[in-house]
Amino acid sequence: MSLAIKPRPGVDGQHFHVVVIGGGINGVALARECARAGKRTLLVEQNDFASGVTSRSTRIIHGGLRYLEHGEIGLVRESVRERERLLGERPHLVHPVRFLFLLNEQSERSAMKVRAGLWLYQRFSGRKSGALSEMELKRVERALDAGHQWSIFNYEDAQCEFPERLVAEWMLEAAEAGAVVRNHCEVLAVDVAQGRARGVLLRDRIAGKDARVDAGWIVNCTGPWADRICQRSAVRTSKPMLGGVRGSHIVLPRFSGAPSVALYTEATDGRPIFVLPWNEQVLVGTTEVPDTGDPGRTAPSNEEIEYLLRSVAKLFPKAKIAAQDIRYAFAGIRPLPNSPGNKASAVTRRHFLHDHTADGAARLISVIGGKLTTAASLARECARKIGIAVPEPTMVSMGPQGSLDPMLDQEALEVARAGAVSEETARGIMEWHGPRAMDIARMALVSAELRAPVCPHSSHIVAEVVEAYRNEYAVTLGDVLLRRVPVALGACWSESCSREAALRIGAVLGWNEQDLGSNLEAFETERTAFLKKPSRGSSTLEAAAD
């Protein structure tokens, strides 16, 4: 079979109540709020939705235990409340995760303060945290460095393994509410005249055409690109709004003794880091390094990779983790508020809405800061600031202790039958697509090509890719394999997987040899720029492995 993807219509000369620049989690959340309120909304993203900071995060939905250290009680309350909402509203994407807080005798943090902080943290969530099994606790203790005396505390937070999928769902809901969404569409400048932002100049990178649209309000949700948008629009702020901080991560295979719970502990210099089970691998992060370079070209340094490698190897010396074990590393720029002279760890993680009226650009707002957990509350606050009445949502119950719905097994069987696929594939579709799983299963029933796995090692199927191109605004192979159906983040992925996936997808989409080659080349270029393999022969990394 062959599937033609319809070209998207132009927007030149149109008027929108709200133009949202930036398709990360904050921008997509805001576009959804505005569209649901009946406002004609345009959401534009220069690359792909969730391809920036959102996809380079630690992938946890947390109240921010470390924020208590800095006295940010209000931010912790907000974060815990939003975490609970996400657990209730998106149970297929956001899951409760048991965390262990590890301290040894060298830590500067006192066990008493940690215990008090965890008690307060639990009180904010309004529900009891269950105890970790003695067997799992002993397993973790056996794997840790026996040369230290460990204090271990357990608490509960949440994880969104694939925030790219959360963004895709919110973006679809925005579009269904009437928003016009455009990825691979760059804002060349905000059009400012007579002291007011009046529209934006756009370049559609897919169609190769420029356009201008009028806007009642413009919201700059570009994260670490926020200052650049203002500069190219001749909007002068008294000082930079952002102080960019790079956060890097490494991804390791599941090593001997790797915990099945998440760890919050200290790196070699006492900074807090996470060691998380993620996507059948282990995610370790993060660093905090000042970075004022191009956010689109940021990459982890060898020093950062060494720092994370040393920290996890020191924690689990029996596992003998070495530099060659690192599957890949990635980095993103946190769009933290400009705070000269302060340590990155001390800069607030609270978001701010910068009104540019005093800068000669009324009706232009820049969003500074924000994080995965609080994106929805940031969007509501921003919508209200531009005059849109947004009610506070009701809390959705997630059931006792976040337990899985006993009907899920039955649903998985129904999806499997509907699509003539395995139960494992049905579960994979449900985990990534939630309520839309049945639609994908019915599509899969059409042909064996649609039921084929994306790559030989994956349970995810080509029908999910077709859904991404047809209904989730995917344009490139990278949009699909790194974000909508993010199998290329998995433990198996290699160049041969890329080629096999491209062949299977191309057969359904009707690609010729030239299409196949150009799609594959562009994908590999994007993947290798994002997921860095540490350079071999680096003396720094070899030393870290010793």
Image: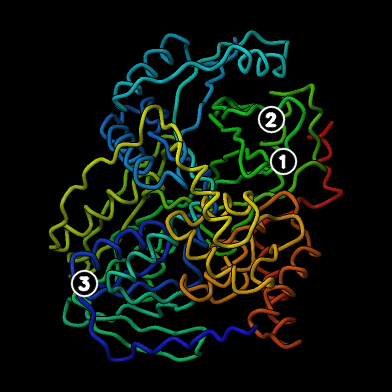
Quarter holding the N terminus? bottom right
Q: Secondary structure at mark 1?
A: strand
The residue sitting at 31% across, 51% down in the picture is 376
Q: Residues within 10 Å of mark 3 (few under 14, many from 20)?
A: many
Mark 1 or mark 2: which is in front? Answer: 1
User: Is 275 displayed left or right of 200 in the figure?
Assistant: right
> What is the quadrant of residue 25 in the picture?
bottom left
Q: Secondary structure at mark 3?
A: strand
User: Is 174 displayed left or right of 408 in the figure?
Assistant: left
Q: How is the image coloured?
A: rainbow
Quarter holding the C terminus? top right
> What is the quadrant of residue 255 in the picture?
top right
**Callout 2 amino acid:** Val
Find disc 3 in the rendering and name its residue.
217
Find disc 2 in the rendering and name its residue.
312
Labelled pair 1, 2 in contact (Cβ < 8 Å): yes
| Mark 2 or mark 3, earlier in chain | 3
How far, Cα to Cα, is label 2 from label 3? 47 Å
Q: Nearer the viewer, residue 343 or 534?
A: 534
58 up-or-down from 545: above or below? below
Q: Secondary structure at mark 2?
A: helix
| Mark 1 or mark 3, earlier in chain | 3
Residue 209 point in image, percent of width and height = 45, 91
User: Is 62 displayed left or right of 353 in the figure?
Assistant: right
User: Is 539 displayed left or right of 502 in the figure?
Assistant: right
Q: Residues within 10 Å of mark 1 (few under 14, many from 20)?
A: many
| Mark 1 or mark 2, earlier in chain | 1
Find disc 1 in the rendering and name its residue.
252
2 up-or-down from 266: above or below? below
